[in-house]
Every structure is written in C-alpha cells, then in structure tokens.
Amino acid sequence: MLKDKPSDLERLIHESLEQLGWTTDAAKIADRVRRLNIGLPLEDEFSIICGWLGQCALIHKLDQQQYPISSKNPFQIPDLLANFNVHGVGNTTVLIEVKSCKKNVLSLRPDYVSKLKAYGELLGLPVLIAWRKFGIWSLVHLDIFSKANTNFNLSFNDAIRNSLMGKLLGDFSYTPQINSGIHISFRKEELLETIKTDDRNQENWKVIIDDVYFTNGDCRELRDLSPIAQQLFYSWDLATTESHSNSHIVIHNTINEEYGMFAHMALTKLLSFHTQKDQIHWRHYFQNDATISNISDFRNGVEENLKAGIVKYIFDIEPATMPIFLNNNV
C-alpha cells in the first residue's frame, strides 16, 4: 500500500501493466507501482543529477511504445532525450540510454547497438550511454564501445577516461584538505550520573551546545562560511573524535585522509542527510524539488571552500577522446 497517493497514480499503474503484462496478478502490479513511485528506475536518478549540475536545459523520458511492430527490428528507442548548454559549444541535444552494471565491463549485443545507432541517425542526434557503477556515473558516446568476439564492450576505466559528465553536465572533481571539518562544542551543565565499571567511570552529563565552527587544512577556525559552503561537510566521510575538559566536550568531525570525489556523488549524500533516509526517493523530486533547490549552487560552495583552504583541488575533467558531435559544434 502507498501511504500517500501519487499525483500521477494512473500513469504509474499503466506503466506497471506495460512492463509486467496485462494479465499479471494484482500483487505484482502493486509491488511494481510501489517501486516506480519511490524512483528505483535509474533514469530518474540520472535525470535529477543532470538538472542539479546546472547545464541541463531539459531532460525527459522517451515513450518506448512504438508502432508499427516491424519498427522494433531496426530501431531501439533510448531512455532519455536531453538538451545541454555546454560551455564553449552551445546548445546540444542528445539521446541517452541508462545502464547499471557492477562488472568491470559493460557489454552490449551487436543488434542492440545497431538499433540504438539507427534511431539516433533517424533523428540526427548522438546516442550516449550513462553507466552507474558503485555510485559513480559515467556518460560516453556509443562509438567508444569496441567490438570483442561478439558483443561491444566498454571497461569501467575507459568509461571514466572518456566520460562526458564534465563536458555536458558540468560535473567536476574536487579534493578536501586533511584536517578540514566541523566541530561541535558542548558545555557541561550538570553531572546527572556516574557509572563505575571495572576500568573506568562513565559520566552522564546534561549539556548545552554553545559553539559550532569549521576548520580548514591548517586547522584555522572559520565561522563565516555561506550555507552552501557548509553543505559540503555533509557530503564527506568524516572521522569523529572527542576532546574533554572540565567544562566542555567537543566533538570533532574531520577529514583524515586525502581523496577526490565527483560532484555528482555528493547529491546522494546530501539528500540522505536532509531526509535522514538511506534510500533516495528520486521520483519525488520531479514534483517537489525544494530540497535540491537549496543546494543548487554546489559549485560556488566548493569554490568558496577552495579559497578558505578547506578544499585543496578542483578539476574540470575533459574526455580523453572528444566525440565528433562536440568537435563539430566548436
């Protein structure tokens, strides 16, 4: 059962029936409607990421019900159509097929590849493959796949090297400084209880938060970061330690190792932080994107933290091989 009726429940039921078949039982339909409503389809996640990164003017699903039936032989309709305002290139429209594969190689059948290409040629648009592996998205031109014995294959390494996530979507990579972090100070008000154990005493205190501050890589205290700059700390894996004095307990949440991450990976962690849920209801944000709007200036927040010494590097990544459709637009 759905706790809240979706505004487009009829469309969800219809889509579920199309996917499962019109003779399927009610339990399977109910489960599929529930899964569609919470946004499990990968194209929902990828569409939200495209819109959030800032260069996407429009992205929408393509209805894959086609006619006449004979058209299924030469054509495969991709999942999405998207338009991007690309820096140095201009207005660019593409077709996108969305995939998830945990293996190190994404493999596509020859007939599947030829049908995707045929549809792209019919519309005069390039066909791209969006691939998510372990939470990392890559976006590559279909021509990057190479013919193996039978199928067309792409390794994860080549997908990252040739990814258009930066060029088309505005994705980038950044590295936080070690020792950067957020610190919360608790003032001790009253000792409520002391519990004696074999090797130490455990104290239960009534406390009040009297200070919250940030530090950069030089351990310098910062208190004037903008809200979007502060958001970065909620997208990082921070190590937690405590320091104690007679009057205070301070919890330190800091970066203790240097690592890089893609900007698009931060969105999942930020949404989990705001909703306090591990599973993201991606589809929900098509109707209500207030939370995403509050973190829409993510690049500006990273650049502010670069100036403050919290972020060490920002990398704008170009693909190893630039596809012809982008070269021709320059």
Image (cartoon, helix red, strand yellow):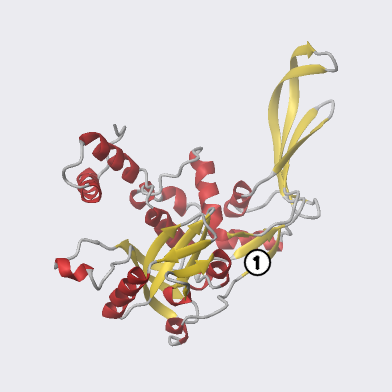
Q: Is residue 20 visible?
A: yes
Q: Nearer the viewer, residue 150 or 57?
A: 150
* Residue 141 horizontal/vertical position (percent): 44, 74
Measured as percent of width and height from the top left, residue 293 is found at: 45, 54
Residue 139 sits above or below residue 15 on the image: below
Please tell me in which quadrant of the rendered image residue 44 appears. bottom left
Secondary structure at numbered mark 1: strand
Q: Position of residue 247 (x, y in %)?
A: 81, 27
Q: In this picture, is 259 found above or below 184? A: below
Disc count in the image? 1
Residue at 34 percent of width and 78 percent of height: 125
Residue topped by disc 1: 314
Q: Residue at x 60, y 58 (%)?
A: 301
The picture quadrant where one finds residue 92 is: bottom left
Residue count near mark 1 (Cα–Cα under 10 Å), binned few <14, some 14–19, many ≥20: some
Judged from this view, the residue extending furthest toward the front is: 149
Q: Say above or below: 133 vs 203.
A: below
Position of 269 relative to 114 (above/below) = above
Classify residue 264 as left or right of residue 129.
right
Left or right of 172? Residue 289 is: left
Q: Inspect the image, locate mark 1, and give the three-letter code of the amino acid beneath it.
A: Ile
Please indicate, yes or no, whether residue 169 appears anywhere in the rendered image. Answer: no
Given residues 88 and 31, the one toward you in this image is 31
State the image quarter where residue 309 is shown: bottom right
Residue 258 as seen in the image, left or right of residue 23: right
Quarter of the N terminus within the rendering: top left
Out of 45 and 71, give the one closest to the viewer: 71
Q: Residue furthest left?
A: 68
Q: Residue at x 65, y 53 (%)?
A: 225
Residue 90 lies, in percent from the top left, at: 43, 80
Residue plotted at (56% across, 67% down): 160
